[in-house]
Image (cartoon, grey):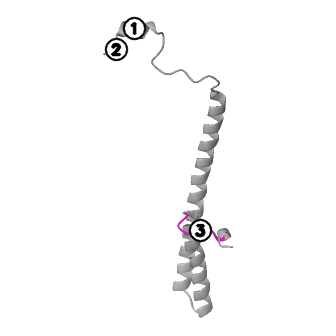
Amino acid sequence: MVNRAKRSSLGTDGGEHPAPGFDEAALYTVVRDAVKDALLDVIGTVLLVGIAFVLVIAGAQAVFSALSFGTVAVGIGVAAVGVYLAAATLKIIPPIRDWF
């Protein structure tokens, strides 16, 4: 058990003092930039998955309401692009720029 009188005579709140040369402003800047990048990544991922979802739905709709083989081919292509976009965004498969 810690002696309260001895602890209060130290004049601290029990926390450790920062190391000499510790710059709180630099740490704040680094943490702020990291959080900003993370939030932008989340927003970008959600938007790209949303666009991929719309492409898949549009492709499926084109396939099921097609009157000719050309419309079916276009619908399958649009749906395939949507599936690829979602998979690449979620890093299930590598992006196309890494294939070459």
Question: Could you say where residue 100 lies in the image, as x and y percent from the top left?
Answer: 69, 73
Residue under label 1: 6
Residue plotted at (60% across, 63% down): 48
Residue under label 3: 94
Q: Foreground: 63 or 32?
A: 32
Q: Foreground: 75 or 27?
A: 27
Residue under label 2: 2
Residue 15, above or below 75: above
| Precedes in sequence: disc 1 or disc 3 | 1
Alpha carbon of mark 2 to alpha carbon of mark 3: how far?
57 Å
Give the label, 1 or 3, closer to the camera.
1
Residue plotted at (37% across, 6% down): 5
Alpha carbon of mark 1 to alpha carbon of mark 2: how far?
8 Å
Q: Are marks 1 and 2 in contact (CB under 8 Å)?
A: yes
Q: Few, some or many C-alpha atoms within 10 Å of disc 1 (few <14, some 14-19, many ≥20)? A: few
Question: Residue farthest to the front?
Answer: 20
Residue 79, above or below 6: below
Indicate the amino acid at tag 2: Val
Question: Could you say where residue 17 lies in the image, as x and y percent from the top left?
Answer: 54, 20
Q: Quadrant of the N terminus?
A: top left
Q: Few, some or many C-alpha atoms within 10 Å of disc 2 (few <14, some 14-19, many ≥20)? A: few
Q: SS at mark 2?
A: loop
| Precedes in sequence: disc 2 or disc 3 | 2
Give the label, 2 or 3, closer to the camera.
2
Q: Quadrant of residue 2?
A: top left
Alpha carbon of mark 1 to alpha carbon of mark 3: how far?
60 Å
Q: Few, some or many C-alpha atoms within 10 Å of disc 3 (few <14, some 14-19, many ≥20)? A: few
Question: Could you say where residue 44 lies in the image, as x and y percent from the top left?
Answer: 61, 57
Residue plotted at (58% across, 64% down): 89
Characterize the magenta stretch by its predominant secondary structure. loop
Q: Which residues are magenta?
A: 91-96
